[in-house]
Amino acid sequence: KISELETRIQTLIEDSKNVRALDTALDVSSSGSPVHCSTPATIVQCLPGARAPDILANLKVLANAKRKYSKIVIHAGANDVRLRQSEITKNNIKEVCELASTMSDTVICSGPLPAYRGDEIHSRLSSLNGWMSKWCPQNNIGFIDNWTSFWGRPDLLKRDGLHPSWGGAALLSRNMAHSRRVST
């Protein structure tokens, strides 16, 4: 199990739906909570403690294959905010999205979850969510507002106030699956 949701970033990548191509998804996660994908031939990979630069490095490896993906869903959580460098975090997320945009015509960012663990983390996550909710649409990146669906629902997080409960992981999975269907 992963000890911190506070530093969570997940990436889901669906392979393009070319003739005879399998639909695949890559979930780069710092959370021990599973993200369930109903896409056939889904591949899930977890990177505990992943931050935006880690996701960027993984996307670069995938980009070397020169494949086009139908959709890329990036779950940006709190792994970067603990560094207390908001502008660097924003630039790192921009860089991830820019690379993802060269690999797919449809890129979606899944926003952070509200953490109930101290005012500073909560404030930084709220600020990141607000920035992403504006920046993503302005740059042709879809945005999943997990903040709204998790807000006021402590039952969706474990007792530590950071990690999603099973119900929270299921909701996060549904949010991501819904965004993939809607953007088709």
Image (cartoon, grey):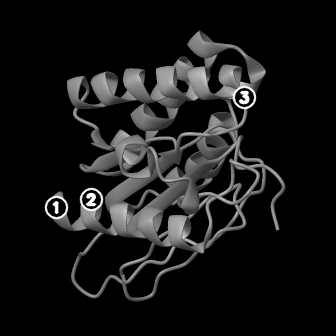
Residue at 56 percent across and 29 percent down: it is 125
**Circle 3 crowding by C-alpha within 10 Å: few under 14, some 14–19, many from 20:** few
Instruction: Kindly report which numbered mark, 3 or 1, lies closer to the viewer in this rendering.
Output: 3
The type of residue carrying mark 3 is Gly
Task: Say whether residue 15 is visible.
Answer: no
Where 131 falls versus 30 (above or below)?
Answer: above
Task: Say whether residue 100 is visible.
Answer: yes
The residues tagged by marks 3 and 1 sit, at their Cα atoms, a distance apart of 34 Å
Which residue is at the front of the view, 126 or 27?
A: 126
**Circle 2 crowding by C-alpha within 10 Å: few under 14, some 14–19, many from 20:** some
The residues tagged by marks 1 and 2 sit, at their Cα atoms, a distance apart of 5 Å
Give the x, y percent position of residue 60: 58, 46
Where 95 falls versus 21 (above or below)?
Answer: above
Residue under pointer 2: 179
Residue at 47 percent across and 61 percent down: it is 12
Residue under pointer 3: 118
Give the x, y percent position of residue 155: 56, 61
Circle on res. 85? none
The type of residue carrying mark 2 is Ser
Residue under pointer 1: 182
Give the x, y percent position of residue 2: 81, 60
Residue at 28 percent across and 37 percent down: it is 141
Which residue is at the front of the view, 15 or 10?
A: 10
Give the x, y percent position of residue 162: 69, 48
Q: Earlier in the sequence, mark 2 or mark 3?
A: 3
Q: Is residue 156 left or right of residue 160?
A: left
Which residue is at the front of the view, 68 or 77?
A: 77
The residues tagged by marks 2 and 3 sit, at their Cα atoms, a distance apart of 30 Å
Where disc 2 sits, the SS reads helix
Q: Is residue 38 left or right of residue 137?
A: right
